[in-house]
Every structure is written in structure tokens, then in C-alpha cells.
Amino acid sequence: MTTAKGLADVNETPIGWAISSRAVEYPAAVAAMEARAAAIADGSAGELVWLLEHPALYTAGVTAREADLLEPARFPVFRSDRGGQFTYHGPGQRVAYVMLDLKRRGRDVRAYVQDLEGWIIAALDRFNVAGEVRDGRVGVWVQRKTPDETREDKIAAIGVKVKRWATFHGIALNVEPDLSHFTGIVPCGIRAHGVTSLVDLGLPVTMSDADRALQDAFEEVFGPTTPAPAPI
């Protein structure tokens, strides 16, 4: 896989790595993320990855279909300018908002999305989970084999926005969310497959474990990181 890091002569300035210890309300997080992305585009702020959790909610991307919101009164619903359809966020899910400067990384959005996929797959590999991508299905998937069937469940979602070559939004990895909360939507518009998490796969993974795996894998793909304060 060609990485975004390899698409341009990117210097080794470390990327800020911030973790919020408490759940962050979605509107406040989006406002802070958009402000940081604008500052990155202006050259007045450095790149940043922000890890957090949200209270239980649904978000609708730019291609979301109203028919895929099955229980509109269950959780708050927020419209988003990210790519994709309906997604759930909530406790036990690690959201990573990725704010990078693609002017320094090849100006290639498709390669950037592939790198996000590769990042998630490399993080899952640290738990001996084989993450895979599928044509026509955004996100990262795992195969589930039972005596009766083999199926594919989604373990991580990807939804991005790029403005003036600064990226925002990012990924959501299911560590230990309440999987029943996904039944209020058709996740990412895909009805034929389910949703899983690391704990659902039988792995005793904590959020701290997931964070370490995400950071180590991120550095392999995008470059070194350094501790940074959360935007809010």
C-alpha cells in the first residue's frame, strides 16, 4: 500500500496526538475540529489527531437516506458534512478525528482514505484480528465464522471531509460499544451485514489498549506523533 507519508517529501515534524478522557458533545467537538482544520489550512496550527468518545447519537453524512434512520427518536441525530451515510457514535467506541495537511502529503484524497483503512487494519492486527476492506463498502470488516455460516461484520467506520487540503472527521473503531444501539439505523446504508467490536469478538481489549494500538499503527503509516492537548 502506498502511504500518504510516501506521496510527498513530508518532513518529520511530529503530529499532535490528543486524547479526551471524558465524553465530548458532538456539536462542540465538530466546531473545535473545524476550527483546527481551518487553522491547519492557513498554516497557523500543526496537524492533530484527536481521540475521544461521544454520548450516544446518530450522525447523517452527505449521502444519508432518511429511510435508513429507523428509530429517529432513540438518540439525538446530527447532520454532518462528512462523506458517508448514517453512523452511530457512543460510549465504548473510539472516535479519532484526523486533521492533517494534504498539501504536504500529496494532495491525493483517495490515497489518504486508503491510508486510513491501512491504519485501522494495522491496529487490529495487533490483536490478531484480520481487518479487510471491500469494494463498494466503506470501512473495515472482519469475517465471522460459525458452524452454520460465514458472515462479514463492520468493526470500524470511515467518514472524511477535506477543505483547502486540510482533513477532518476520520474514523470510529468499535472497542466495546452497546451494539444494540446500531439497530436504530442502517449503518452506512448497508443492510446485508452486521456490526461487531473487539470485545464482541471475544477479546478483553480496553480503550487504553486500543489507543496504544492505534497510535503505534498510525505512526507506521503517517509518521511520528507527540502528546498534545485536546482542542476543548
Image: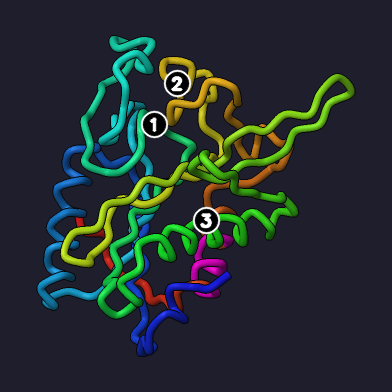
Say which residue appears at 30% left-offset and 12% top-offset. Answer: 72
Name the spot of residue 229 as percent of width and height, x first. 27, 65
Residue neighbourhood size for the residue with mark 3, other residues' Cα within 10 Å, grouped as few (<14), some (14–19), many (≥20): many
* Residue that mark 1 sits on: 87
Element under disc 3: helix
Q: Is residue 55 above or below residue 6?
A: above
| Residue 110, percent from left and from top | 40, 60
Above or below, comparing residue 121 to residue 181 in the picture: below
Quadrant of the snapshot with the C terminus: bottom left
In the rendered image, which residue does mark 2 sit on?
A: 186
Q: Residue at x 12, y 68 (%)?
A: 39
Q: What secondary structure is marked by label 2?
A: loop
Identify the amino acid type marked 1: Thr
Q: Residue at x 71, y 49 (%)?
A: 129
Task: Mark 1 and mark 2 in contact? Answer it, CB < 8 Å.
Answer: no
> What residue is shown with label 3?
117
Dominant secondary structure, magenta: helix
- Classify residue 220 by image quadrant: bottom right
Which residue range is magenta in the image? 213-220
